[in-house]
Image (spheres, grey):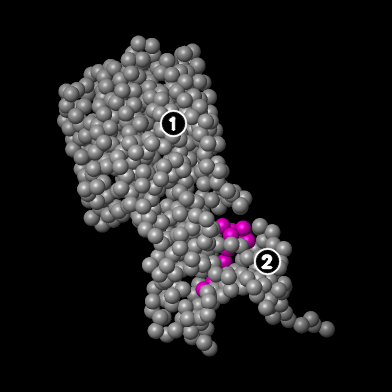
Amino acid sequence: MPADATPPDNKGAPEHPQVVTGPSSVPFGPGGADPAPDVKKAESMFSPLRHPAFRMIWIATLVANMGTLIQNVGAGWQMAILTPSHDMVALVQASTTLPVMILAIAAGALADNFPRRLVMLSAQSFLLVVSLVLAVVAFMGLLTPWLLLTFTFLLGCGNAMHLPSWQASMRDMVPREDLPAAVTLNSMSFNLMRSVGPAIGGIIVASSGPATAFALNAISYTAVIYALARWKSPQEARSLPPEKIGGAIAAGLRYVALSPKLGRVILRGLVFGVSAIIMLALLPVIARDVLQAEARTFGVLLGAFGLGAIGGAFAAPRLRKQFRIETIVAGAFLLYAMGTLVVAFSSFQPVTMIGLMMGGASWVSALSLFNVSVQLSTPRWVVGRVLSIYQTATFGGMAMGSWLWGALSESFTIQITLLIAVGVMLLGALMGRIWPMPDFNNENLDPADTFSAPALRLDLKPQSGPIMIMIDWDIPPENTAAFLAAMTARRRVRIRDGARQWALLRDLENPDIWVETYHVPTWVEYIRHNIRRTRADVESYNALRALHQGEGDPPVHRMIERQTVPLTDDLVIPPKLP
């Protein structure tokens, strides 16, 4: 045996034992993993509030959302006062969502590699400081259009850093069956405040000016900081060092690229973000130019959108029980298109409010379903990054849409721009005919906890490598077709979890022997690769293990590559002339 190979007593140790062991493990027989809890069995939309941690932070988030919406009214109306440009008004919304597109993936990597509670505390503290400075500058009368956009962009950066950790933390606060309701409640908390916050914000802006709105927003962040400081988050045991940011981002992108279902969800989120943001992006202009209204009316219109979103949140549990996910999402696109048509042809405030309510109901229905679908289709080790990629697509679409609709409304009319957006929404509804939304994933994506690092006779460092893995499969001829089919799925799982240069080799002298090989860059990445396995992945191993005719589990060879032969030895060197 080569000196770099593992010792004989570990050589055959399987990477996926057939039975999961440990205090919290569940045996897996021939039928595979125990079924995951059915998310449709949750009692009601309010069931997550039974859990103290979620309830405490949710209430604090209500307060913060109130402050955020008051600030949004102040910023939107302040820009409408500072400049008549439709572009600049729409860019207020874009400057809030653009940072999510830029920073969310890095924020997701932080959420998966560092304590999420500390990440959220840091983000909220940053938001508090920026809001205070914005309020001071506004009170001093120094705000300009571009300076206002700078502050709203910085606030967007803070929210971008907060969102992946907050959304990924919901699974630390509530059980799986309550997760859809928790995500819907989270959306409802924002929209509950949207129904009253903008109206209050309009009154504050009209009576005291935007600077007071900015100051109240700064105060609201203290509620979330207090709740996070009190929350005793689960202490996740981390036996490995954090991943480097670049590698962590690459791992998240690779996971999404090799998960077709996630790709469909993210694509629909992008299209929805681009098209649906038009109502919010152009609402200050609609209030000012179409309805000939003031700040109070602008707040009331935003409140109508939020009121519709609350109605959508209450309807969500019943809709999920009665219809497939694709039906609900397509319906949300169509209802939003109808609401946009109402807004496009209305010059009467109550009718415009009806259209906005239709949009709000569609908004929360679609976005909450996208979010839940992502969370239920993603294991814990990468959930922050996958959520951030989804948010990058969705909020990036909102940022692009805000700029696009603002530019089009400058070139054409507001009505024509709204009608173009309706066409995009109809396209989003029809996309489901080709790429339908997946139904909720009931696979058990909890960690398998089946891998134990072998005892090595070499003194390897965490960064030692590259590491080559070879697994010997003894497959009888009658099982060859089933083996190749199972290996196709295994290859995707291997590469998804970090393997490189995966290959399947067949012995020419003994055709029953197949060798699965792959590389990882370092020993610590090999350990990380294996602990990423989920209980659903164990089924893949069990299917392959049933086809293996050798005694015991397939032997595993773990080897470290060493370059000991000079490269020039492979060259033909001409002899020296006398």
The magenta stretch spans residue 491: no
Q: CA distance from mark 1 to mark 2?
A: 47 Å
Mark seen at residue 456: 2
* Residue hosting label 1: 56
Task: Residue type at mark 1: give it.
Answer: Met
How packed mark 1 is, by other alpha carbons closer than 10 Å (few <14, some 14-19, many 20 or more), is: some
SS of the residue under disc 1: helix
Task: Provide residue 243's location: percent of width, then percent of height.
Answer: 58, 50
Question: Compared to 438, does 135 lie above or below?
Answer: above
The furthest residue to the top:
207
The furthest residue to the right:
578
Task: Provide residue 114's location: percent of width, then percent of height.
Answer: 56, 43
Task: Provide residue 560's location: percent of width, then percent of height.
Answer: 65, 68
Evaluate whether residue 147 shows in this view: no
N-terminal of the two: label 1 or label 2? 1
Q: Residue at (83%, 83%) from the top-left corner?
A: 578
Q: Residue at (50%, 77%) from the top-left corner?
A: 473
The span picked out in magenta is 515-528
Task: Residue type at mark 2: give it.
Answer: Leu
